[in-house]
Image (cartoon, rainbow, N blue to C red):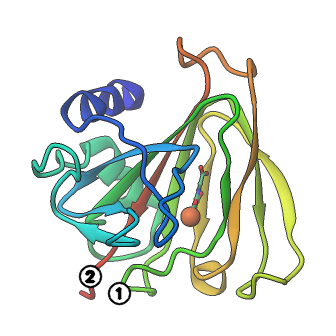
Amino acid sequence: MLLGAVRCVIATAPLYRPTMPRTGKPFSVTMTNCGGLGWVSDKDGGYRYQATHPVTGRPWPPIPPVLLALWDALSGYPAPPEACLVNVYGADAKLGSHADTDELEFAAPVLSVSLGDVATFHVGGTRRSDPKVRMRLHSGDVVILGGASRRAYHGIDRIHPGTSDLLAEGGRINLTLRRVMLR
Ligand code: MD6
Ligand code: FE
């Protein structure tokens, strides 16, 4: 049900490969979004939220009801998320250590759902140099970075290919729900 909804989002708002601010280096992860706002990055504009797909120019499709229900059940935040970033990982993709700080609202958590292959996830403290713990995220796992962990550094070290048969094409999808604007 969730995977079907994600496939519909990708059919409407195709995956694209963002690039790093300033250097223009391509991400190893491909991305799209749903919701009123989507997180994007490119060489000239840097990290930001915007209401339209950077390639098609069209508005992002709505966040599927099943994800809004998950947010209601788990976020502890009394308003819906505006953004859901869809990250798609092939066997060799990674996501460097980062803190999610492009939102205006830090009272809301960032909530993620993983689908497909197992990934090694790390999470540390609010300084990049803080010690990190590593854990394997399996298909169906939910991670919530809220409260003291809202600004913690975290990332994906590696994908473990062939560890799930959910996705026919292999790899991993991660969905992150975000409240961007102040209530
Ligand atoms: C990923 N996740 O699991 C990347 N961010 O592919 C994130 O960057 C993330 O899992 C904020 C909160 C939870 C997360
Ligand atoms: Fe993140």
The residue located at (74%, 24%) in the rendering is: 161
Residue 30 drawn at (x, y percent): 46, 41
Horizontal relation, residue 131 to residue 13: left or right:
right
Above or below — where is 148 with respect to 84?
below
Q: Looking at numbered disc 2 in the image, what kind of residue is underneath it?
A: Met
Residue 42 drawn at (x, y percent): 38, 62
Quadrant of picture, ligand 2: bottom right
Q: Residues within 10 Å of mark 2 (few under 14, many from 20)?
A: some
Horizontal relation, residue 8 to residue 25: left or right:
left
Q: Is mark 2 within 8 Å of ligand 1?
A: no
Q: Residues within 10 Å of mark 1 (few under 14, many from 20)?
A: few
The residue located at (30%, 53%) in the rendering is: 68
Above or below — where is 19 with respect to 114?
below
Choose between 158 and 122: the one closer to the eye: 158
Labels 2 & 1 near each other (Cβ < 8 A): yes
Residue at the left extreme, as displayed: 58
Q: Which residue is mark 1?
A: 104
Indicate the secondary structure of the residue bearing disc 2: loop
Q: Which residue is mark 2?
A: 181
Indicate the secondary structure of the residue bearing disc 1: loop
Choose between 126 and 54: the one closer to the eye: 54
Choose between 123 and 57: the one closer to the eye: 57
Q: Looking at numbered disc 1 in the image, what kind of residue is underneath it?
A: Leu
The earlier-in-sequence mark between 2 and 1 is 1
Residue at the front extreme, as displayed: 23
Choose between 99 and 27: the one closer to the eye: 27
The residue located at (39%, 72%) in the rendering is: 46
Specify the quadrant that holds the N terminus: top left
Residue 139 drawn at (x, y percent): 63, 33
